Amino acid sequence: MATAAAAAAVESAMEVVPAPADEAVPELAGLSGLVSLPGEVLEYILCSGSLAASDISRVASTCRRLRELCQSSGKVWKEQFRGRWPSLMKHYSPTDYVNWLEEYKVRQKAGLEARKIVASFSKRFFSEHVPCNGFSDIENLEGPEIFFEDELVCILNMEGRKALTWKYYAKKILYYLRQQKILNNLKAFLQHSDDYESYLEGAVFIDQYCNPLSEITLADIQTQIGSIAELVRKTLRGINSRHPSLTFRAGESSMIMEIELQSQVLDAMNYVLYDQLKFKGNRMDYYNALNLYMHQVLIRRTGIPISMSLLYMTVARQLGVPLEPVNFPSHFLLRWCQSAEGANLDIFDYIYIDAFGKGRQLTVKECEYLIGQHVTAALYGVVNVKKVLQRMVGNLLSLGKREGIDQSYQLLRDSLDLYLAMYPDQVQLLLLQARLYFHLGIWPEKVLDILQHIQTLDPGQHGAVGYLVQHTLEHIERKKEDVGVEVKLRSHEKHRDVCYSIGLIMKHKRYGYNCVIYGWDPTCMMGHEWIRNMNVHSLPHGHHQPFYNVLVEDGSCRYAAQENLEYNVEPQEISHPDVGRYFSEFTGTHYVPNAELELRYPEDLESVYETVQNIYSAKKEDAE
C-alpha cells in the first residue's frame, strides 16, 4: 500500500515549483499537502530520481520535517549521488558513515576542475605530444583521484560524434593517471615474497598497465579461472568420484602428493582446456601483444607459451597439483615433479609440460628436440615471479620495437616503463628510452635527466650520451625561438591550386584507403630523399602540386598528392586515434576542425561547407 501511495504522491509532488535560489522560501508555503504525507512516502518522492540536487536543496530549506528527511548522511542525498555517478558506489561500504551531501559537493567540484583542465589541453599541447609533466595539473588537484577519473570516464562516454577533442585529451589524461597508479602498485608488489598466486597477479599488472582504459581486475580474472577449475572438477568427478581435488580449494597450503592423483587432474585439465574450451597456442598470429594479456588470453582462448603456461599452472594449483614455471629458452614450460619430496632431485626427476602444445608432457631430451638445441641443466630450473614478468615484458618490448603504424610507439613506451620499474639501472634500455623520447619530441627535459643517469651508471656511454645531449639542447632552444602559429589562407595567390579543405573525407585513388585531411601545403614540403623514395617524380604533376596531411583509417598518418585523392561520396568516420587532436565533431559528411586547427586554416571551414554542399547537390541531381 505504501508503494502505491508513494507512486500516486510522486505526481502531486512534481507540481511543487521550487522558489528561485535568490528568493526566501516561506515556511510550508504551498507544501502543506506534501509534508502531511507519511515519511516513507516523502522519502520515496525525494529519492525517485525526478528531482535535481538543486531541487532537493530548496525542498530541504522549506521546513524542519523536510530538512530532517534531507539530512546530509541520509538516503535522499545518497540516492542523488548514486543517480548522478552510479559507478562510484562500488567504492563505498554499506557499513561506512558517509556524508553524502559533502561527497556530492566534492565530486561536483572535482568534475568541474577536471573539465577545465581537459579543455585547456588542446591549446597547450596541440603542436606536440603531451609530455609526462603536462599532467601535473591533475596530480596537484585536491580531492579523491577516483572522482577525477570518474569525470574523465563520463567525458569518454558522452554520446554522439561531438566533443571529439575533449574525448581525445580525457583519454590521454585517464591513460596516464591509471598507469601511474598501476606502476606504483607493481613496484610495491615486487617487494613481496613469492608464492604461486603472485605469478598471475604480476601478469595482471602487466595487462592493466598496457591496457589502462580497459576494466581489468585480478578478481575478475581469478573468477574466470575458477570457473575453468570447476569444469575440470566436473570432468574429474566422472574419473574418480572421491578425488581430493573435488574438495580442494585455492589457497590451501598442502598439495595433493600422489602422482597418480595428480595425473588424473592433468588429464582432466587437458580435456577441458583443449578439447572442451578449445584453448590453443596461437601459431598463426604469434607476434601479437594480445597473446600476452591475460584477459585477452581468456577471451580469445589463445596465447603464447608463457601466457598459456601461467593459465595452466594457475588452474592446476587450484586443484592441488604443484606445477612450477621454467624459463626455458625460446619456449616457456612448466615442470611436474615425479619423485618423492625431499629427495636430491635433478632435471630428470621432472616431466615438462608444454601448455602451448595442448599440455603435452615432455622428457628432458624431448624439450631439447622442441627448440632444436642442447641446453644446460640450469635452464630447467624454476624461476621466481620477477623473472617471469621480465620475460613477459621482454616479449612486449620486442613487439614494441616492431611497431610501424602507431606513430606514438605506445607499446614500446609502456614496455620500457615496465622493464625499468623492475630493473631501473639497465643502461641499454635507459638509452633506448632517451632515444625514443628524443625521436618523439615529447619531453626534452626528461631526456636530459635520463642521459645524466646513464652517464653516472656507465661513463663509457659518453659518445652516445653526448650526441643526444647536444641535439636535445638544440631542440629546446628551437622551441624557445618558435615564432608562433603558421596561418594558411586559401585566398592567398600561392594557394590557388589547393582544391581540398581540412575536414573533408577523401579516398586514395591508387591504394583505396579512406582518410580525412588535417593539413595541406601548396607544394610538396618533404626533402629530396623522401621525394625520391616515394617515387613522387613519376606522378604527372610531380612534387609541384598541393600535398595533404591525412589521417588514414588504418591508424597511420600520410602525406598524399592532390592528384591521388578524390572525394568520398559516401563519407564515414575515420577511426584514427588522433582525430580528436584536430577535430571537434563529425557531422556525417565531414569533420569540423577544433579551435586550434581552425586558427591555422581560418578559411577552410567555409570552404568545406561549400564543397560538401556541391557534392551532395550533384549527387542529388544524378539520382534524379
Image (tube, rainbow, N blue to C red):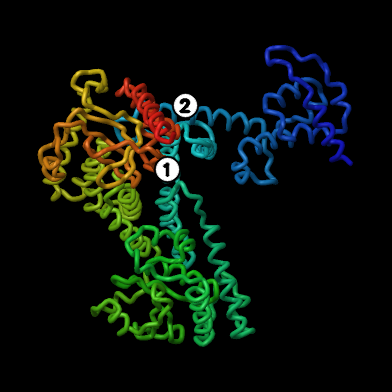
**267 in relation to 78, above or below:** below
Q: Secondary structure at mark 1?
A: helix
Residue 445 in view (yes/no): no
**289 in relation to 596, above or below:** below
**Dot 2, crowdedness within 10 Å: few (<14), some or many (≥20)?**
few
Please report the residue visible at 53 percent of the width from the left and 31 percent of the height from the top: 110
Residue 604 in view (yes/no): yes
**Dot 1, crowdedness within 10 Å: few (<14), some or many (≥20)?**
some
Image quadrant where residue 535 sits: top left
Ranked by sequence position, the earlier of labels 2 and 1 is: 2
The reply to whether callout 2 and callout 1 are in contact (CB within 8 Å) is no
Please report the residue visible at 29 percent of the width from the left and 33 percent of the height from the top: 128
The residue under label 1 is 175
Image-based side of 312 in relation to 43, left or right: left
x and y percentages locating residue 242 in the rendered image: 64, 84
Q: Nearer the viewer, residue 283 or 315?
A: 283
**Mark 2: amino acid:** Lys
Extreme residue toward the front, this view: 624
**16 in relation to 94, above or below:** above
Q: Which mark is residue 116?
A: 2
Q: Secondary structure at mark 2?
A: helix
Image-based side of 466 in relation to 201, left or right: left
Q: Which mark is residue 92?
A: none
Please report the residue visible at 46 percent of the width from the left and 31 percent of the height from the top: 163
x and y percentages locating residue 24 in the rendered image: 74, 12
x and y percentages locating residue 38 in the rendered image: 87, 33
Point out the image quarter for the N terminus.
top right
**Mark 1: amino acid:** Tyr
Image quadrant where residue 89 sits: top right
Q: CA distance from mark 2 to mark 1?
A: 18 Å
